[in-house]
Image (cartoon, grey):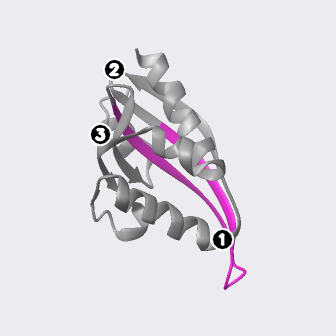
Amino acid sequence: MSQENVELVRRLFWAFDNDADVWLSMLSPDLVWFPWETNHTPSYGIGPAMRTRAEWRDAWDEARSEPEDVVGEGEHVVASVHITGRGKTSGASVDVRIHFHCKVQEGKVAYVYEYEDKAAALEAAGLSK
């Protein structure tokens, strides 16, 4: 099951950038998401997740989310994602790495917490070595 969960989370980032319907199909209706941009204020459910995605996508002329390292065990998956973009209004370039601790339950992503520090994400997921 771990490898299936790792692949699900890897595909989640492709769908985030490319296909809202596919992305939505990967999310649990009980999703809890703690976005970095909102200072980890939790959002609950599909509606808020779709709004967060739309706001993120609308802010950029160019944006890419490239998973560089995705590891998991059981329901826990950590995806280290290289995010690049150019702001639509400001024209500012962004080049950051965010580390997503995800929990997969019943074949859907049910929990996402975004970290700036990879070690913290791995520790939270119980995957630190």
The amino acid beneath tag 3 is Ala
Residue 94: x and y, percent? 65, 68
Q: Looking at the picture, does residue 82 appear above or below residue 12? A: below
Q: Main secondary structure of the magenta part?
A: strand
Q: Which mark is residue 60?
A: 1
Q: Position of residue 80 (x, y in %)?
A: 53, 42
Span highlighted in magenta in the image: 79-104
Which of these two is toward me, 28 or 63?
28
Foreground residue among 74 and 32: 32
* First in sequence: mark 3 vs mark 2: 2
Mark closest to the chain's N terminus, 1 or 2: 1
Q: Report the disc number at residue 74.
A: 2
Q: Element under label 1?
A: strand
Q: Viewer-proximal residue, 5 or 69?
A: 5
Label 1 vs label 3: CA separation?
A: 30 Å
Kindly identify the amino acid type of the residue bearing the numbered disc 2: Gly
Identify which residue is drawn at 29% across, 39% down: 124
Up-down: is 32 above or below 52? Answer: above
Residue at the image position 45 percent from the left and 55 percent from the top = 116
Q: Which residue is mark 3?
A: 124
